[in-house]
Image (cartoon, rainbow, N blue to C red):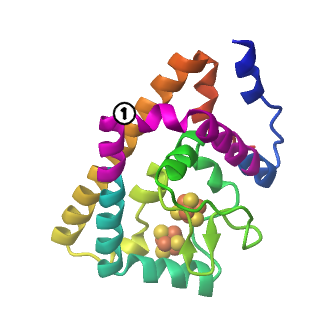
Amino acid sequence: MIKNLKYLRIIDPDPTSLILEKIKIAENFFYDWKEYFLKDKKFLNDLYEYYKAIQDSNILMEKLGTFEECYYCSAIEKGGCCKAGFENEVTINILLINLFLNVKIPKEREIAERCFFVGSTGCKIFARPTLCREYFCNRLLRLFSPEEYVSLTQTISRELTLLYLIERYIRKELEFLLGDFLLEIDLKGYR
Ligand code: SF4
Ligand code: SF4
């Protein structure tokens, strides 16, 4: 168990330091355990299905105009819901999933006082937390017909169900490998 103490750190409450520290911890887990996880065919298949489900959600949201609306709201009007601190909805577990999906994780806050992961054209992290995927403000809701809204929530539900299953599996395996002190991997860490 002593070797596992390397994952324990004192976490700085500043939001930028906090998310950078979480990224570092996720990278350590990935480096140490990726071969163990990648041997599991079901895990690989779930990751593949999840990747496709995110793409399906993105295609539909693009078609329905949500990305464009959010772009105007946050980049042009400097408003919107992707505020500083919200990056901590992205847990170590979700960061680890992004590493398993082999997608890039941003390493600096591009826009001051906005979420660490928001850039000039929107969110820059591929696998996103539930809150970011299922939240539709009134401005967005006005874009959809009831039928389109049903289709959107069904598509996103599939993505989020897969996210839940993958997160649960990773957490269970890490607890088995390293001990249940790893409950912290799901903490949000807001100030
Ligand atoms: S979800 Fe609504 S409030 Fe948030 S960025 Fe998009 S349009 Fe703006
Ligand atoms: S959608 Fe992306 S940019 Fe917006 S709060 Fe979530 S992680 Fe941050």
Q: Is residue 60 magenta?
A: no
Q: Is residue 38 magenta?
A: yes
Spot occupied by residue 146 in the image (x, y as percentages of width and height): 19, 69
* Quadrant assignment for the C terminus: top right
Between 191 and 103, the residue placed more toward the observer is: 103
Spot occupied by residue 51 in the image (x, y as percentages of width and height): 36, 57
Spot occupied by residue 114 in the image (x, y as percentages of width and height): 69, 67
Q: Residue at x 50, y 56 (%)?
A: 102
Q: Which residue is mark 1?
A: 40
* Quadrant assignment for the N terminus: top right
Q: Residue at x 57, y 48 (%)?
A: 95
Identify which amino acid the numbered label 1 is placed on. Answer: Asp
Q: Quadrant of residue 31?
A: top right
Principal SS element in the magenta part?
helix
- Look at the image and tell me whether residue 127 can be seen: yes
Q: Magenta residues, as a range?
A: 20-49
- Look at the image and tell me whether residue 143 can be seen: no
Q: Is mark 1 within 8 Å of ligand 2?
A: no
Q: Residue at x 70, y 61 (%)?
A: 84
Spot occupied by residue 134 in the image (x, y as percentages of width and height): 39, 56
Determine the secondary structure under disc 1. Answer: loop
Crowding at dot 1, Cα within 10 Å, few <14 / some 14-19 / many 20+, comes out as few
- 158 versus 116 height, above or below: above
Lateral position of residue 66 relative to residue 85, left or right: left
